[in-house]
Amino acid sequence: MHPSPGYILLLVQQPRVLGFLNELLKQCRYSVAITCSEAQAVAHTLHQPPFLIIVAGDRHHWPHLQLQELRSQANTHQITLIALTDSNAPSWVYQEDNPGFDGFLVNPISIDILSSLIHSAQARQHCYSH
């Protein structure tokens, strides 16, 4: 789907997560751009910043350099940057090991939690952009 103003960017390392997230986001009726690499995600944020970036995958495979670039873009454009980890492999990240996420969610998430996250991310970006 082509990103439009007010879109959500998904960086999905595990294709099986995509179906579940995509179905939830369709219920919320927001435009979604999907990338499979950090480089693609950075390119999207440089071209047209989303209001929310969800990084889904194993935290041990998050490349810190690209995440730092996403964090930099998130700071510049008040983008909420969230990590979505798998419920069968929960692993707490100590604050000093956090590569720059605003928060962490465990998959599967409910439509209510996702909706609340989306509204919060939109409000954050809107408040800081005016």
Image (spheres, rainbow, N blue to C red):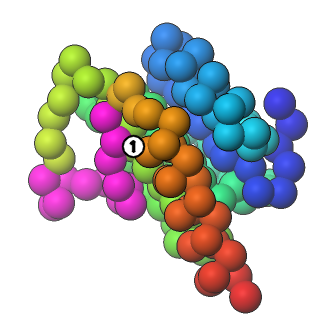
Residue type indicated by callout 1? Ala
Residue name at image x 61 percent, y 71 percent: 123
Count every numbered label the image shows and give the total: 1
Q: Is residue 29 magenta?
A: no
Q: Which residues are magenta?
A: 94-106
Residue name at image x 85 percent, y 49 percent: 4
In the rendering, at what x and y percent does residue 129 appear? 70, 82
Give the quarter of the figure containing the C terminus: bottom right
Question: In this view of the protein, which residue sits in the foreground, 47 or 53?
Answer: 53
Q: Please indicate, yes or no, whether residue 4 appears anywhere in the rendered image.
A: yes
Question: In this view of the protein, which residue sits in the foreground, 31 or 9?
Answer: 31
Question: In this view of the protein, which residue sits in the foreground, 35 or 54?
Answer: 54
In the displayed structure image, the side of residue 74 where residue 122 appears, left or right: right
Q: Is residue 99 magenta?
A: yes
Residue at the bottom extreme, as displayed? 130
Q: SS of the residue at dot 1?
A: strand
* Depicted 119 relative to depicted 54: above or below: below
* Depicted 102 relative to depicted 25: above or below: below
Question: Which residue is identified by label 1?
Answer: 83
The image quadrant that residue 3 belongs to is top right
In the rendering, at what x and y percent does residue 62 appear? 37, 36
* Depicted 86 relative to depicted 78: above or below: above
Residue name at image x 48 percent, y 19 percent: 17
In the rendering, at what x and y percent does residue 99 appear? 32, 54
* Depicted 2 relative to depicted 67: above or below: above
In the displayed structure image, the side of residue 67 where residue 130 appears, left or right: right
